[in-house]
Image (cartoon, rainbow, N blue to C red):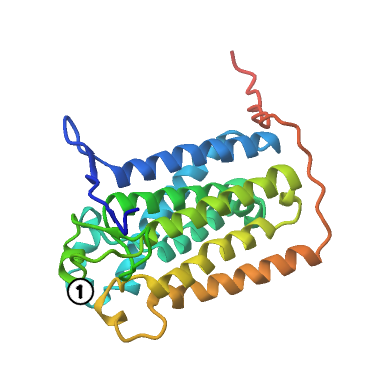
Amino acid sequence: MLDYIVWNADPTLIEWPVTVRWYGLMFAIGFWIGFNIVARMFKREGAPEKWLGVLLIWVAAGTVVGARLGHVFFYEWDYYSQHPLKILATWEGGLASHGGAIGVIIAVILFSIFTSKRSPLWTFDRLVVAIALVGGLIRIGNLMNSEIFGHATTLPWGFMFPRSAEWHRFYEGVACHPTQLYEALCYFALFGILMWMYWKKNAGERPGLIFGVFFIGIFLPRFLIEFIKNPQVAFEQDMVLNMGQLLSIPFIILGIILIIRAMMRPRVTLAYPNRFADEPKKPSTGKK
């Protein structure tokens, strides 16, 4: 039996005629599958089909902008405050999941105000099911990039990352925790739980319940796994709790509050026509 696994995957899937990296592919696959899951939910509950495209635009923008600004403000503000144009250089890396979460929250609130006219909780309870899947696939993308791994370990499933400059600098010859896989497995399990809650238990009839379980299922594992994950930036070296853990605590607390609130309120009865709502007809002008 091997005492470790040498992870030497090429982060680039295709180089010609266009460059396709595994990370981007995982992101795209997640968005495509997630879009179809949310479409099935909207159809099941008779929501207008046109909401899907609008929601996708809001969420995609909120994810990218929020994740980028989260990294800028939470992790490397000293650098970006001196080089503001570099904030736009997303191809150089630097995305923060907590910033992405905040961006999505803002996007859904705006979608609810301008498009659905429903409580944001209605959208969150359906959208986060897909987001859990996307989160797991993104961590697989991190694995393909040989990034965001953990401390040294003697466990038989430890990974060596010969394509990582960080590994060569600090851990060469030593296996490390594949924390990308730990998080991915947690998020895939959460995805399964949320799918079961929505489709088998009609948990969407308790507004905020799925959303609350999502927050705990995403950020509690993240909080715990951070204890064996390498710091992302230098200032985290001497912190008892790193930035990722500090940012996770409010989301965990909010998840608990949402679950308690949902369980203390009466269940809402929803209709399930299993068809998209008809588009309202434009009033006739009388002209031919």
- Percent position (x, y) of residue 127? 57, 49
Q: Amino acid at mark 1?
A: Tyr
Assign the C terminus to one quadrant of the image: top right
* Picture coordinates of residue 112, whole percent (x, y): 59, 52
- Res 199 → quadrant: top right
Q: Is residue 45 above or below residue 182?
A: above
Q: Quadrant of residue 69?
A: bottom left
Q: As rendered, which of 121 and 138 lies closer to the eye?
A: 138
Tell me the SS state at disc 1: helix
Q: Which residue is mark 1?
A: 79
Could you say which is closer to the camera, residue 235 or residue 193? 193
Image coords of residue 10 (percent x, y): 22, 45
| Relative side of 127 to 9, left or right | right
For the point 22% across and 53% down, the residue is 91
| Residue that extends furthest to the top in the rendered view of this protein | 288
Residue 113 drawn above or below residue 249: above
The residue at the point 25 percent across, 56 percent down is 90
Task: Between residue 149 and residue 241, name the one nearer to us.
Answer: 149
Q: Residues within 10 Å of mark 1 (few under 14, many from 20)?
A: few
Residue 57 picture location, percent across and down: 44, 44
Judge from the rendering whether residue 19 lies leftward or rightward of residue 188; answer left or right. Answer: left
Q: Residue at coordinates 62% horizontally, 58% vertically from top-left?
A: 211
